[in-house]
Amino acid sequence: MTAPQALIRHLVVHKLLKEPHGPASIALRHAEMTPTAAAQRLIDHIAQRYAERRGKGYGRFEEDEDNYPMPRFVRQYLAGEQDFLALSQAMMRHLEARATEEPLASGGYVLIARVDDAGADCLLVALVTEVVGMAITGDFEIVDSPQLDLSNLRVAGRIDLSAWQAGAERYIGFLKGRADVAHYFKLFLSCNDVVLPLKETQKLVQGLNQFAERQQLPPASRDALFERAHGYLDEAGDEGEPLALDVLVRRAWPEAPERLQTALAEDELALSGGFVPDRRALKPLKRFKAAGEHWKIEFDRSSLRAGQVIYDRERGALVLTEIPEELRQALLGGG
C-alpha cells in the first residue's frame, strides 16, 4: 500500500451554502471525522491536485488580526485554548462573512484538515463541489449518482504551521484561479501576498538552477536552458509584462515544458505568479561572478563554449585565453 501523501491528524467537513449573487450561510458538523481509508484517499487526492496546480499565490498572515482573524484562531488552537472542531467552526463563520462579500462566490463542502504533508505540519482547507455522475445498481439499472468533483479543484489553501512557528517569510499558499474567487479566499486565509519582484525573480533563477542540477543537464543543454529563459524574462522585464509561467517553460525548455513547469510549481520554491521579472536578478543566467580575498572575476557563460574561459576540473582552476594586450603587458610588468 502506498504511503499517504498527507497523513491526516484531524479532519472536519462542513458546508458553505451560497448561490452566485446571493447571501452565504453555513451548515456545521458537530464532531470531528474519523480518518478512514476513504477519507485518507480523499485528502491525498486533494493534496496531490493542489500540489500539481500552477499559478498559486503565496504569503504570510496579515498583522491586523481584528479584520484578518485567522492567525488568532490558529494561535488559540495551538495553545490548547480550543480544540480542532472549534477552530474549524470559527474558520467557517469567517468564511461565511468573506463569501457574502463576494457576489460570484459559490458554495460547496469545506474540508478542513490538519495533516503531515511531506514532513510539514499543515492546515489544509479545500472547497469541493458535487457533480452528477452515473451508476449501475444491483438490479442493473442506470441511475444518477452525485459525487465530488475532484477534477475541478478551484478553491484550496495550505498553511504551513511548522514554517509559521519557525518564523519563515512565507507559509501560506492558495490557488489563484479566478481573480474574484482567489481574492475572497485569500482574505479568508488572512493572507498578505504582497510580491517583491526582485525576490521572486531570484527564486525563479534558483528554481531553474535546481531543475538543471536535478536533470543532470550537460553544460550545453544547461546553457541553452538559461539563455532561452533569460531572453524571455529580460524581454518581459523590459516591457513591464507580468511573468507567464506557461510561456516561460515552453520558451526555455521546449523539449519537455511540463517537466520544467512541475519543478517551478513546487511548494518548496513557493514561486508566485504574475510578477514582473526584475532584470537585476537575471545576471546569473548569463554570467558567472565570484570573488576571492585578492581577486574578482566575471564572465559570460558563452565564453566557456567559445574557449575563452576554460575550467580545469582536476586542478579546480580557471584558464583565461585571448586576454587583452593591455592586461598581458600589465601582468608582464607586474611579474
Image (tube, helix red, strand yellow):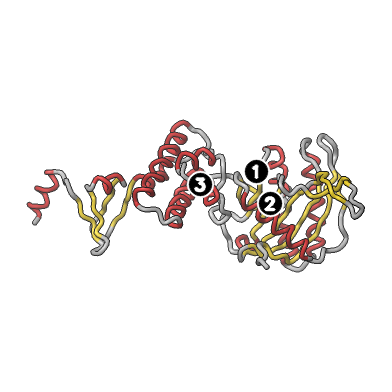
Checking the image for residue 176, the label placed there is 1
Q: How far separated are the C-alphas under marks 2 and 3?
A: 20 Å
The residue located at (89%, 52%) in the rendering is 137
Nearest to the eye among marks 3 and 1: give it: 1
- Secondary element type, mark 3: helix
Checking the image for residue 200, the label placed there is 3
Q: How far separated are the C-alphas under marks 2 and 1?
A: 10 Å
Quarter of the image where one finds residue 300? top left
Residue 64 relative to residue 31: left or right: left
The answer to whether 29 is drawn above or below residue 251 in the figure is below
Quadrant into which the C terminus falls: bottom left
Q: Amino acid at mark 1?
A: Lys
Residue closest to the eye, 160 or 66: 160
Mark 3 or mark 2, which is nearer the start of the sequence?
A: 2
Q: Identify the residue position indicated by label 2 in the image.
A: 157
Residue closest to the eye, 257 or 313: 257
The crowd level at tag 2 (other Cα within 10 Å; few <14, some 14-19, many 20+) is many
Residue 197 relative to residue 320: left or right: right
